[in-house]
Amino acid sequence: MLLLKLAFRNITHAGVRTWLNIIVLSFAFVLIVLTEGLYDGMLQQVRDAEIDSNIGGGQFWQKDYDPYNPFSIELSHSEIPANLKMEIEKGNATAVLITSASIFPRNHIQSVQFKGIDPDQKIVNLPVYILKNETDSSIIPGIIGSRMAKSTGLQADDIVSARWRNINGTFDAGDIKIIKVINTEVKSIDNDQIWIPLKKLRDMMQAPQQATLIILNKNISEIPINNSEWIFKDHKYLLKYLNENIDRKRIYSTFMFVLLIGMALLAVFDTQVLAIFKRRKEIGTLMALGMTKWDVIVLYTLEGCIMGILSFIAGFLYGFPLLTYLAKKGIVLPQIIENTQFSILRILYPKYGLKLYVLTSLILFISVTIVSFLPTHRITKLKPSDALKGKLT
Amino acid sequence: MGDSQIIQISNLVKDYAMGKQFFRALHDVNLSINTGEFCGLVGPSGSGKTTLLNIIGALDNPTGGDIIIMNNSIKDLKNKQAAKLRNESIGFIFQTYNLLPVYTVFENVEFPLLLLKKSKKEREEAVMRALEWVGLSDKVNSRPNQLSGGESQRVAVARAMVKLPRIVLADEPTANLDAANSHNILQTMLKLNLELKTTFIFATHDEKVIRYLRRKVALSDGNVINDIIMN
């Protein structure tokens, strides 16, 4: 208790040295929480967007469907089983029919996928209801994402020729009118894809009642069916690649975490080393007055710990309002961020949980304590008489 | 060790390593000091006075021989026991005052009592009494950097005396002070020696101090060459 009082007294009386350390440490603390919060927020947004706009509560896949095998696409469609049809009619699911096709923008050929979806569906967050606005039945209305628009040079109201095959393998062709270019955060519903009305695509493919996949409502995690043609894919499966990608990104976040902690700890370590060098005469005096070497070591370590605690308080005082403000208003990302493997997030909302605060505080506190202790081991070798002379043995 | 004898030094040797060689700072020193003495280890620089004072104060260990202080053999003392001995029984006064810079005068003087775990009331009474002895009652809230050299050394004397130690060790206490301040400090220490029967041991080559000593132990090259008790 006495050493704690003395350490606190030393810290509060030390002036600029203390405040500089507290500023550096608290800044590191706030920055770590913000960085981690940004990552957590980004990952949460990406997951939410993926679920919201693409995978819903899970999907039933036609057994031959493999999104990573382009040759499987044309074969992977079957009639929808009766109970899934019922769920679609009840508004608990929506069907998507997928086929490979080619379009010819700017006199070039480009492979794409046509994705047929019911314009009245409310299962995924896609503004496909706009497709109903096209009244000319000779035109195929289509919606594309901004990435697709960029890669093809297509804009709203453009008409582009397209070629596809029906389920019998016969080529057919027609014109697609781009009704709208949508800004979606989700890459997997954008790249090389054109969304068209399900009924239209079924007609084009001569595949009535057929679908490639069925997307369930977000609130439904599975519907039992007894049909070997259709296989249920849950979130774990559908988010596997995203999660793996996220885990890879986590390495950067961990690196940032270590870097920031390292910088803060270096400041503490330097201060401690300097303090022991600068205060060696004081160390000698403390020993002459009756302190043991271990008392002095504990005193110096406690000074570091208290500095850590004061930093958390300072960080909390100015960091909490700042972090809360950023979490509410979000951070607008520059355009350059769009070229990432992730979904486009135009505004990033950091997300800080209690776990993040507690864990960061705990890690920083333990690290500060260790780093405060490490340089003090020299004191154990120090003779009081040498310390009084200003020597470090 | 007699009742009045507070320090008994026998065949004391102190060597310092200098590379692969050793430098002998003290050669077979034999000395006994009684309670209430006002004595000094005198001699030129390098004669071994500070080394001897440090060993008496349990700040350093002897290479050979022994010092018995109040029935404690210095060479057998563990780190913690040495700290306890210093804390309870020995006061130190240094040439450069060695006040703790972040503390006020009051807090500096109070510090040894905190280590002794005295109550707040006891501490306050003892600190104010010690500051009265040295005439600094009006400086309780000053910081060391606001004090003159003479005032700083008086604070150091108060800090050494506040716990009423049996022994006070003063290493060149007047070296940084002018004649008037030196006289003032020495008068104060002499008064405390007479009133409280505290044993004072100085390491000095300052004539101003030597004039006040009642016993002069002259050292040269680590040997006691003279031991004069003044009447």
Image (cartoon, grey):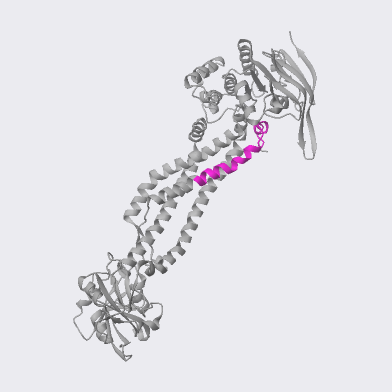
Q: Is residue A301 above or below residue B2?
A: below
Residue A282, quarter of the rendered image: top right
Q: Residue furthest left?
A: A135
Q: Is residue A341 visible?
A: no
Report x, y in % for residue B38.
68, 14
Residue A321 position (above or below residue B160)? below
Instruction: Locate residue B37, reporting x and y percent.
Output: 69, 14
Q: Residue furthest top?
A: B231
Name the side, left or right, on which B216 lies relative to A54.
right
Count of marks placed on residues: 0
Please say whether residue A113 is visible from this viewpoint: yes
Q: Is residue A339 magenta?
A: no
User: Is A302 displayed left or right of B85 in the figure?
Assistant: left
Question: Magenta residues: mostly which secondary structure?
Answer: helix
Q: Quadrant of residue A82?
A: bottom left
Outermost residue to the front:
A226
Nearest the viewer among A96 and B120 is: A96
Tell me the quadrant of the picture where the C terminus of chain A can be found. Answer: top right
Position of B132 relative to A278 (above/below)? above
Which residue is nearer to you in this view: B2 or B204? Answer: B2
Q: Is B220 positioned to the left or the right of A319 in the image?
A: right
Residue A379 image-quadrant placement? top right
Percent x, y of residue A37 = 40, 55
**Percent position (x, y) of residue A20?**
49, 42
- For the point 61% across and 26% down, which residue is it? B84
Per the rendered image, the range of residues in magenta is A366-391
Q: Is residue A373 magenta?
A: yes
